[in-house]
Image (spheres, grey):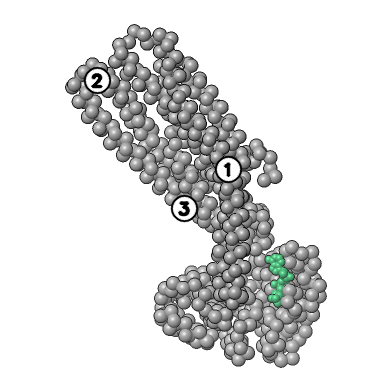
Amino acid sequence: FAIPGDLFIIYNLLRFCSIQRVLFPSWTSQSALMFATLLGVTLTEQLIIYQVGVLPSHFYKVLADKDYSGFRSLVGTAMVLIVLNSTLKSLDQYICNQMYVSWRKTLTESLHSAYFQGRVYYTLNVLREDVDNPDQRISQDAERLCKQMSTMASRLIVSPFTLTYYTYHCFHSTGWFGPVSIFGYFVIGTIANKILMGPIVSTLFEQEKLEGDFRFKHMQIRVNAESAAFYRAGKVEHMRTNRRLQTLLETQRSLINKELWLYIGVNTFDYLGGFLSYIIIAIPIFAGIYDGLSPGELSALISKNAFVCIYLINGFTQLIDLSTTLSDVAGYTHRIGELREVMDDILHKQCDYDPASGESYDFDRFVDFNVHAGPLDTAFILDHLSYKSPYSDELLVEDLSLKITQGTHLLVVGNTGTGKTSLLRVLNRLWEAESGFVHMTTCFGPRGTLFLPQKPYLTDGTLREQVCHVLNGSFLLSGSVDDDRIIQFLELAGVSSLLKRTGGLDEKVDWNWYDVLSPGEMQRLCFARLFYLQPKYAVLDEATSALTEEAEAQLYRTCKHLGMTLISLGHRSSLEKYHDVQLKLCGEGRWELTKLKGGSGSLNHRDITM
Ligand SMILES: Nc1ncnc2c1ncn2[C@@H]1O[C@H](COP(=O)(O)OP(=O)(O)OP(=O)(O)O)[C@@H](O)[C@H]1O
């Protein structure tokens, strides 16, 4: 919030416009058509409201004249108008609700497509600190923005028409004095509201951030409930969660305090408006303009004039009442606009973004992804590569040159924090290299390279989806041949018992896989997935750390039997016998490359070092 107030408003307005472009992509889009229908319905509704509004003046007249037949037909007309009015009002509400759902769909889907493009979700959640709670912005703030906009829509859309129409009527019956005093009244009200609204937007923004933090704390406890219970961490977590709640509530209180002044302003304005209409009507009456009218005609005229003036004032006060909704819209616009800008920025900075075409290479493409074509038997060529962690100045590895070729299994070792996993992040293009190059010469996926991260990755869904649906739907083959393969690989990975627990490959389970599987089972399930996908190169980050050495041996043997070249990270010396070359990261940028004695593959040193 370093931007000065007025500039911030303009900036936020631009953000609002860019969100509108997402919601209304073309004149013939669903939202635009719904908006046009809403305009039609509300305009018709206003015409009926006018007819209903002047009904009392007709009643005054027929009652004063004791006109019985006129009275009867007036009652009939009134009934029809009231039914029409209430039907149109409900239709107006119905279209607004439909528009809200349609806007929410469009906006959230547009945020999703930016969020899941390339590795934006990773960079945003792990590497960028300037945007808090992206999950909340996408799931909650987008919803609230659409809700508030839909409540504003029908009132805003019709305002220009009703204000013009009633200004004309007001001018007709009171002369220039009526409309001018009402406009003046509106200008004063707008200025007062702008002053009162100023501090609310920033506080609302802060409140939404704290709301997200509070929810995140609960999510952390939910995810880590077991570990927390082992530490008997209930008390301390209770205290910390309460602390977050307190901070949130303090901000909420301060927001309510600031809103009090806005509400006082809005309500005073409402009541003054009702009062003002009588002053405006009183002037032509006292000036003697209507002196020639009979009492019946005069009361009919007063009633009609009162309706016109009150409706015009009401039109303006409704606009002013909208300022509370508008402050919410401004707050949510800020949060969503900021998220969109940061995601855009991340996308443009991604190394696979091509500024010439304005497009990014498909980070998620699995097949035939061959940006840096190289020798067929090579997976990665590292050329004088240096890298460091995001918030540090010290290099983790300096000037590393290496070629990872088929059939030469590589083991990466080193102390904690020396940058082993970071090497994989650089290989997988999650982090960018400080200097030098990494050429990935195979595609990502079953025909190329697959990574098994340190923390097993499971998705929601059936057992079949855990094994073969994690990467891309296209790998999901149906039929008994595939079923047999999956079952065979589950057996080879030592998790065939899961079949019994789930009741079958395609049985829907309502549990969270992370909660019900042991760390060892999760690692084995990831191996079953690896066996199923059978990539040429498998990059395993401490993938057997929760398993016994026998289980590790069995899994490594199967990988080799399936023809995979292994690149493993780990601390265990038992891993050495499955590899040919060892890369040791020694810290402070140093590294050593050695040939392992126990390795079965042949090492041609030129293939490894460049
Ligand atoms: N997202 C991140 N932001 C900032 N620093 C990070 C991030 N991820 C890792 N680091 C830091 O980078 C350094 C290297 O981390 P890395 O995960 O590569 O270690 P490692 O060698 O794999 O360790 P371990 O043996 O414990 O797995 C560590 O000091 C770590 O704290």
Query: Which residue does the numbered mark 2 point to in the structure image?
Result: 63
The residue positioned 57% from the left and 74% from the top of the image is 229
Q: Please, what is the three-letter code of the amino acid marked with disc 1?
A: Asn
Of callouts 1 and 2, which one flags the residue occurring earlier in the amino acid sequence? 2
Q: Looking at the image, do the residues carrying marks 3 and 2 touch, with CB atoms under 8 Å apart?
A: no
Q: Position of residue 564 (x, y in %)?
A: 61, 82
Q: CA distance from mark 1 to mark 2?
A: 51 Å
Which numbered disc, 1 or 3, marks the residue closer to the eye? Answer: 1
Amino acid marked by disc 3: Lys
Q: Is residue 610 above or below residue 28?
A: below
Q: Point out the residue furthest to the left here.
A: 69
Task: Tell me if I can see residue 170 in this picture.
Answer: yes
Of circles 1 and 2, which is in front?
1
Q: Amino acid at mark 2?
A: Leu
Visible residue check, residue 119: no
Q: Determine whether the beta carbon of the residue marked 2 sits less than 8 angstroms from the nearest atom of ligand 1.
A: no
Badge number at residue 105: 3
Q: Which label number is shown at residue 257? A: 1
Q: Earlier in the sequence, mark 3 or mark 2?
A: 2
Between the residue at mark 1 and the residue at mark 3, the CA separation in whole angstroms equals 34 Å
Q: Is residue 490 left or right of residue 443?
A: left
In the rendered image, the quadrant that contains the C terminus is bottom right
Query: Measured from the top left, where is residue 432 in percent x and y?
Result: 71, 64
The image quadrant in which ligand 1 is located: bottom right
Q: How far across and how far down the image is residue 489, in percent?
A: 51, 84
